[in-house]
Image (cartoon, helix red, strand yellow):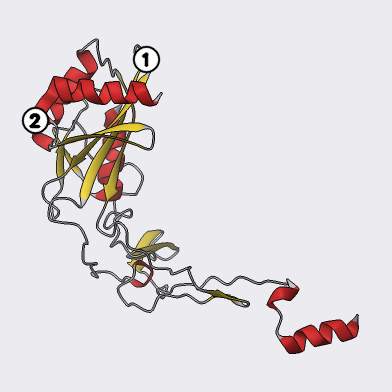
Amino acid sequence: MAKSQQRLAESLRGAFGDRLDSVSVKFSEVTVELSPDKLIGVATELRDRNDFAFQQLVDLCGVDYSQYGEVEWQTDDASRVGFGRGVDSATSTGRLRFGDELESVTVEGRRFAAVYHLLSYRNNSRLRLRVYAQDDDFPVVPTVTEVWNSANWYEREAFDLFGIHFSGHPDLRRILTDYGFIGHPFRKDFPLIGHVEMRYDPEKGRVIYEPVSIEPRVLVPRVKRDDSRYLSEQQDDEAQGDA
């Protein structure tokens, strides 16, 4: 299988040349990165050329790389009573409030990406495309609905959850959240508690939105161990005495 993936990677480099930013084989998958302005042309050829024949778009998703590689929890240190870890930073994702922002660890134009998973039944091969939106403040990627019709709902989902705009989409509107929803819940700077909460008001006879009343907090995981190896010497003596 690895040889077929290497052959596919070489074929992609030969066919598209400098139109592709990179071609790599990692985790048993061929990944192509390209700029938004090259997406439609390359995608069309990947679908129509017999040597590629990627006629099926299996999945399309958005990604927010703003905190890629950053971790809130340190799990290296552990004691007999559990993990000594916790988040003290007021800017961690678990403590964000409305209006808070996290400093991105990525370079400009590399925060948001659309990722496409393609399948070729004819050649029994898979391919992943990754396209970075060049503007982090207003991420835009061309729609591929004219290339693969199945992209319609996938792009609406990525728009709803990540705020990635797909230019030329025939009906780009929210698909999972409601019309009054504020923000994009899969972005790394979206508060875990949300922005607003809703309830039914019997006096008004309708559902109303109010500022969220939940206090942001980070729960500290604990691990309980009953193994005698983790007992103190006094507890160990008591355990032996009881025996």
Amino acid of disc 1:
Tyr
**Dot 2 alpha-carbon crowd within 10 angstroms: few under 14, some 14 to 19, many 20 or more:** few
User: Which of labels 1 and 2 is toward the front?
Assistant: 2
The quadrant where residue 104 appears:
bottom left
Query: Is residue 41 at least partly visible in the picture?
Result: no
- Check the image and name the residue furthest to the right: 243
The quadrant where residue 168 appears:
top left
Q: Position of residue 100 (x, y in %)?
A: 24, 70
| Label 1: which secondary element | loop
* Side of 105 relative to 123 (left or right): left
- Check the image and name the residue furthest to the front: 3
* Up-down relation of residue 183 to residue 123 (above or below): below
Which of the image's four quarters has the C terminus?
Answer: bottom right
Residue identified by numbered label 1 = 121
The quadrant where residue 127 appears:
top left
Q: Nearer the viewer, residue 89 or 52?
A: 52
Q: Residue drawn 38% across and 33% down? A: 28
Q: Which mark is residue 18?
A: 2
Q: Position of residue 94 (x, y in %)?
A: 38, 69
* Up-down relation of residue 125 to residue 61 (above or below): above
Q: Residue drawn 27% across and 69% down? A: 98
Q: Position of residue 162 (x, y in %)?
A: 27, 49
| Label 2: which secondary element | helix
Q: Residue drawn 23% across and 17% down? A: 47
Which of the image's four quarters has the N terminus?
Answer: top left
Amino acid of disc 2:
Asp
* Side of 56 relative to 130 (left or right): right
